[in-house]
Amino acid sequence: MGEFELIERLFRIPAAALAERRPGVLLGIGDDCALLDAGPLAVSTDMLIEGRHFFPDVDPAALGHKSLAVNLSDLAAMGAEPLAFTLALALPAERARDLAWCEAFAGGMLALAAGHGCALVGGDTTAGPLTISITVFGRVAPALAPRRDGARIGDDLWITGTIGDAALALEQLFAARGQGGAGVTKADSSAGGTDTDAVGASPDAGPAAIPTRHRLERPTPRCALGRRLPGLATSAIDISDGLAGDLGHVLAASGVDAVIDLDRLPLSPVLLALAPDARWRHALAGGDDYELCFTAPVAARDAVLAAAAVAATPIARAGSITARAGDRPAICWRRGDAPVALALRGFDHFA
Amino acid sequence: MGEFELIERLFRIPAAALAERRPGVLLGIGDDCALLDAGPLAVSTDMLIEGRHFFPDVDPAALGHKSLAVNLSDLAAMGAEPLAFTLALALPAERARDLAWCEAFAGGMLALAAGHGCALVGGDTTAGPLTISITVFGRVAPALAPRRDGARIGDDLWITGTIGDAALALEQLFAARGQGGAGVTKADSSAGGTDTDAVGASPDAGPAAIPTRHRLERPTPRCALGRRLPGLATSAIDISDGLAGDLGHVLAASGVDAVIDLDRLPLSPVLLALAPDARWRHALAGGDDYELCFTAPVAARDAVLAAAAVAATPIARAGSITARAGDRPAICWRRGDAPVALALRGFDHFA
């Protein structure tokens, strides 16, 4: 099957059906450019690479889902409503010939896209190491979009869902494969021993053995709540590299510090059953959560809870914003009133 | 140097300077999303991979230039004015540590961006095989944008610049390196013997030896003329995979055929000096030209010439659109009134 026929078969026909129904998308796949006319747009891009962000034997439907989900998560953190996306895809020749793999990949991606009304409007397909680069576009009210620099002293700090589950699943997948297993290697792991940058997992380790595996493989972008944050949240970020590192970006941009009560962190029963060291490591320095961390005034507390209820999104109020104490942004970890010393750092691709 | 510091140093500061001056860009690099408010947008994406689209020892400034140029060319073909772009970049660790390489790459890209008023507004940097994926956004009048499906019987067929030079340069670079040379391999070449899908070239073969090398390494996106095509051209496409293949997309979408006079093709003196077989192969089935091929009514002939003069863009009227004769789109090649039989095909990444 040739390049153009592959694109046609896998993406163009289902994509066209969605694009035609999406107000704001004037022209989708098939010309030099797509044409959008939807008012102000939020734009974000991500690139995922085999062996670094996912295992070579990852379930292709999960890979398709997650590749788009991580981008939708960025729209959610900006308070934007998904509109459209482009896909640049490099496929090794043996993958391009594996029609079942390609169909599952496209199916996983387009199912999530349809669920969010996000139309595939353009792309580029080439031969090469398996690489997925997506750019998403979302409608947004620019003046009200929650940016990283808007956190104010006294604001509540909110977190959606639960955090740390994906990092735990990844560690357990590594253990099941052995340290020398194929695919994503220990060299990709952060110093803390938790790889915070892997999107998929092997289908050859049974799901039953790894209770939080679905959180690693099929994250839920928090678009339902995200689009309700403009006018409510003062700042927002999605948690992709661990709460400590991502919240640090907000604190740096806003010129503030934060205090977090570890006992108020939203953790799954599986995380709560871990020893404290592993629990905090996964929850705070693990990655791949794709939950939202946002700040909002205390006066908006009821409105935040109402928005979360309407969006059917679990949230927890885990801390608050404080005045900058030193030269650099800092997070004060506590359990109740007692400070806790934690040594954590974010993931760095080139460290 | 860590990932975030690398991004900061190479891209964020110069990008911010341009983004702040660009009307329509409300927020650039540094948050979960960029924010654009510039009316209707044309959007296109491309992905370039080391060893397939460029040699590993390509001049990094030329690689940066070309990576953006190929995307700007898509905007030109849609009649759009460049506004902004995002960059997803995978870098091997040894490249990330080579600051001179990274600075030259960023410099080549940002210099072209500044020349077109195209602001870098977002990105993603990761470790991995050298891969560059850019998505561009341009302002456009959607109703007047020249699409592939607008060519009408009797229209003139116009081509900018000269075609075939890049393909010739690539063939000569292959010859200079020998068939077993490092980097882009003969396995990537099309059946016709001309690789139509390589963006760069090695700095170790002297430029003096390959007269059209600059056309391969530093293509000129035809944005100056492209933005003047709305209301003038009935269809347009940029020539990236060879005139025969790319014009074929227009003919297929428009339901027409074309006749082209080979003696009216815009060819450089270097191409004209070749034997006919090599000349037509490079000009018609070679790639990497990034010239525009567009159609316009005969009545607009003077207006087209005036627009090209204002844009300082050389153009040639090389043929015209004819009624569909058979089941599939066809190009009738002629020299004057005499038909010429040519066997050509477009490049296919997975063929």
Image: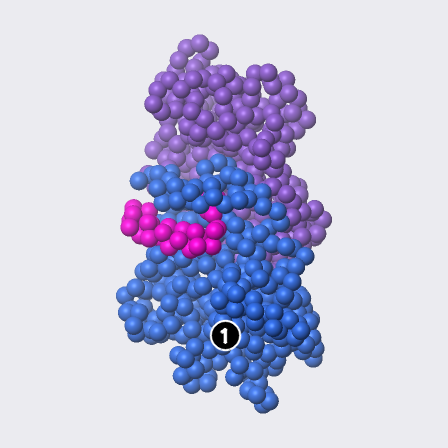
Chain colours: A purple, B blue
Camera-nearest residue between A214 and B315: B315
User: Residue A255, position in %: x, y?
Assistant: 42, 24
Give the residue displayed 37% in from the left and 29% down from the top: A345
Image coordinates of residue B291 in percent, x first then y, are 50, 68
Q: Main secondary structure of the magenta part?
A: helix
Q: Residue at x 57, y 76 (%)?
A: B317
Residue A65 screen position, x and y as percent: 57, 44
Name the image quarter holding residue B234: bottom right
In the depicted view, which residue is nearer to us: B135 or B139? B139
Mark 1 neighbour density, 10 Å: few (under 14) some (14–19) many (20 or more): many
Residue displayed at 56% across by 19% down: A297
A205 relative to A280, above or below: below
Residue at 65 percent of width and 45 percent of height? A38
Q: Check if residue B259 falls in the magenta segment.
A: no
Q: Quadrant of the N terminus of chain B?
A: top left
Label 1 SS: helix
Magenta-drawn stretch contains B109: yes
Q: Mark 1 lies on which chain?
A: B
Q: Which residue lies furthest to the right in this view?
A: A21
Camera-side residue: A149 or A270? A149
The amino acid on which the numbered mark 1 sits, given as a three-letter code, is Ala
Residue B304: % across, % down? 59, 70
**What is the magenta range?**
B94-123
Q: Which residue was labeled with disc 1?
A: B285
**Residue A233 visible in the current orientation:** yes
Q: In this view, does A117 lie to the left or right of A281?
A: right
Q: How many dots with numbers? A: 1
Q: Is residue A129 visible?
A: no
Answer above or below: position of B67 versus A41: below
> Relative to B121, does residue B129 appear above or below in the rendering?
below
Of all residues shown, which one is farthest toward the top?
Answer: A337
